[in-house]
Each structure stands twice: as C-alpha cells, then as structure tokens.
Amino acid sequence: MMIRPLPRRREQPARAPPKPRRKRPCQSPAEFTGTEPSKASGLQLLRDSAGFRSLWSARVISVGGDALSLVALMLHVADTMGQAIAVSLLLLVGDFVPSLLSPIAGAISDRFELKRVMIACELAQGMVLLLIALSLPPLPLLLVLVGLRAIAGQVFLPASRAALPGLVRDKDLETANATLGFGTNSAEALGPLAAAALLPFVGIRGVLLVDAVSFVLAGAVLLKLRSLPPAPSPEGSKASLLGDAKSGLGYIRSAKVVRVIALGFCAIVAFNGVDDVALVLLATESFAAGESAAGLLLGAVGIGLLFGYALTARYSARMSLVTLLVAGFAVNSAGNLLTGLAWAAAAAFMTQFIRGFGIAAMDVATNTMLQRLVPQGMLGRVFGNLYGAIGVAAALSYIAGGFLLDATSAPTTLLIAGGGGLLTTMLVAFALPGVLRKHTADSDPDDTETRSVTQ
C-alpha cells in the first residue's frame, strides 16, 4: 500500500494587528431598556433612559434658574449703579471671561469622573448664587462672584456633552442632542417670564435664592446618574492639567475635520451674532414700530428655535449630518440676509422665525458629529475649546457689529452679516465632505460611528 504524503500546509502571509477600535461606554440595561432597532424619539429617550432623563432634567432646572438670576442681577445693577456700562460689564464677565479658560475647562472633563465634575459644578454655582443673594455686594465684588459662577458653568458644558454618548445609543445621539436643546432653550425662554412673576413678591434677593436652590436641586438629580469614569487619553501617558489643555488645542489643529466644523461654526457666529442688537434698531428706527415690535423680532428666533429642535429630533435621521450642518448654516445666515431686505416688521418676524430652524439644525449637527468623530478621551477638551471659541466669536461680533451699525444702518448690517454667513456656508460645504472622507479612510473601516456621520 502506497502511503501518500500529507498535503503541505500553505503558509499564510503575516497580517498586521487590527487597529484598536475607539469604543464608547456601553449602556447597561438599567440605563436604556429599549431593544428596538429603530431610533428612539425624544419622549422615548426621556421615558426609557434613566441617565439621559437625569441629565436633561438637571440642565433644564439649572438653565431656567440661570435665566431667573440674570434678569434679577441686571435689574439690581441698573438700579444701584445707574450706568449702562455696569450692565455691560456684568454681561461681559458672565459670557466672555469664562471663554478664556475653556481649554482648562475641557481638560477637567477629560481628566475626572464626569458625574462628579457635573455635580461639583452645579453645587459650586449654587454656593456662589447664595453668597450673592445674601450680600448683594458692590459691583467689583459682584463681578468677581459672577465670573466664578460662569467659570463653573463653563466646566459643566463640555462635561455634559462628553457624557451624552455614554447615556444613549449611538444611533440616538441626534435625537438626544435635539431633545436636550429643546429643553434648555424652553427653560431659557421661560426664565425671564418666571422672574417677572416672582419679583413683585420675593424681590431681587428672593429670585437669586430661587436660582441657588435650582442649582442644588440639579446636582441632586445628577446623583441618579451611573458612574462615568474618564476614558483613556489618546496621547497615552497622563500629563498635568495644563499639559492636557495644551494637547486638546493640539488635537484640534491636527484633526482637520474637527477644525473645519469648529471654524465654520465660529465664523457663522462671528457674522450673525450682531443680530440681537441689529433687530432692536431695525424695529425701532427702520420700521418705526416701537419697542414691542423689537421684542417680537427677538422672540421670533426663540420660537423658531424650539420648533427647529422638535423637527430635528423627529426627522434628522432622514439626512446626513453634513447636510444638516450645511443647511443649518445656510438657513441661519439667509434669515439675517432676508431680514435686511424685509419691508415691514411682520416680514422680518417670519424670516427670523425660519432662521431659528437653522440655528437648531447647526447646533444638533455639530454636537452629534463631534461626539462621533472625536475620541472619547478628547471629547471634553474639544467641546470646551469649541464653546470658548464661540464666546470669543460672539464678543467680536458685538464689537464689530456695533461699529458697523453706527457707520451704516440695521438693514445694511444684517445684509452684510447674512452674506458673510452664506460665504462661510459655501466654504464649509466645499471643504467638509472631502476632509470627512479622508478622516473615515484613515480610521478603522469597520468603525460604524465614523461612517454614521455621513449616512
């Protein structure tokens, strides 16, 4: 009997080890009980995701309280100081100064457990508001305290956005961001009305105490969150806090797709941020319609914003995030351009109402794209730097727009603002698809999180 030799085993070429995939924190059944393959609605997320419900509730409570205290503080400064510059300084300290510390604010979010960071920020803001309410200090000390409260809020923002991917499924991020935006903007719109109702009964000190309690209540709601430990840093070894802040800035410089999104968003704000001042002058001077018409024009954007968030939560799955972002930029800018061409207050109201849809779309698209494209260990720093840059862009828009309004008119200023925004939109529409394809090609081809940005 002839013995046949065993077939020789063909040697396989050596394969490179697979790239480590960037993983998001998994949701436990207690966090999200839905098992359906389709995307959840905003109401379903609030009902089924205990973690998202806690974050949403805390944000709505604290933002509503913030709107209360802003009205009270502005009235207090106006009554006691009697100078418009004092109110301007109050707003500047609250909005612009924290932006200068945004790299560190984002680094804190990436360095420490997110649940503890958010609770500490809420309690810190509550303590500062309590000090202000009890003492009603003179302007220099008041500005210091307002600045400290604003810094704590600046730390909270990137932490809350970085926490969201760990609380909902990846496919539900658009809906979660839209639902969060709807809740916070509703609270911000209702806050001044609540302040107007409370002031005759409890006074400025009482309204400030209500805000202090709201922050404590928001912190208590966040206790229901599960632990959200920091993700491993993409750069490997742990650096100092300043080193983390520096690496966050370096990441934005190196990640072209993130840079295009961030620069585009900030440019849109820089061009269109002046509309708050321009709309007042448009109503009172160009249309001679009075202060009530100015209030209606300013309120039109807020109403459109709420409708925009509701529609985005429901229909954002039908278009890619790139399309949603570019459409948001275009509608936002075209709204101001058409308002500059409006012939009456009613027409301007409609264009500003539609503009609110664009603001909601660009906000949801930007947040969701960054949550999917940026490594989890860098997400807080990216959001921190983005929010800081937006604050700087808004301040520049107020300053440059003020000079432009003095030199020209409200319609001309709105035309220039809208035109500059549309030019920015075209540049982003041209650049973003290419850099996103390159980013996807350089990433793991099986990474569904990156691919879902363009789907």
Image (tube, grey):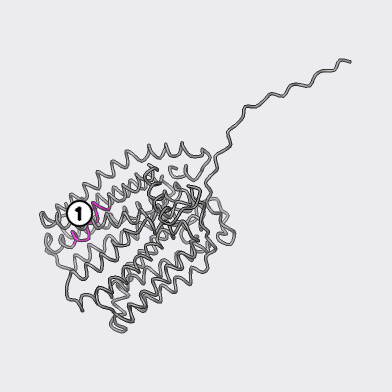
Identified at 82% across, 18% down, the residue is: 4
Q: Residue furthest left?
A: 407
Q: Position of residue 411 (x, y in %)?
A: 15, 54
Viewer-closest of 110 and 437: 110
Viewer-closest of 61 and 286: 61
Is 149 one of the magenta-colored residues? no
Give the main secondary structure, helix, strand or loop, of the magenta stretch.
helix
Q: Within the image, what quadrant is residue 253 found in?
A: top left
Residue stretch in magenta: 269-279
Is 272 one of the magenta-colored residues? yes
Identified at 27% across, 50% down, the residue is: 268
Q: Position of residue 201 (x, y in %)?
A: 31, 84
Mark 1 lies on residue: 339
Seen in the picture, residue 61 relative to 2 is either above or below; the reply is below
Q: Within the image, what quadrant is residue 455 found in?
A: top left
Q: Position of residue 291 (x, y in %)?
A: 17, 68
Q: Secondary structure at mark 1?
A: helix
> Does residue 281 appear left or right of residue 103 in this picture?
left
Q: Residues within 10 Å of mark 1 (few under 14, many from 20)?
A: many
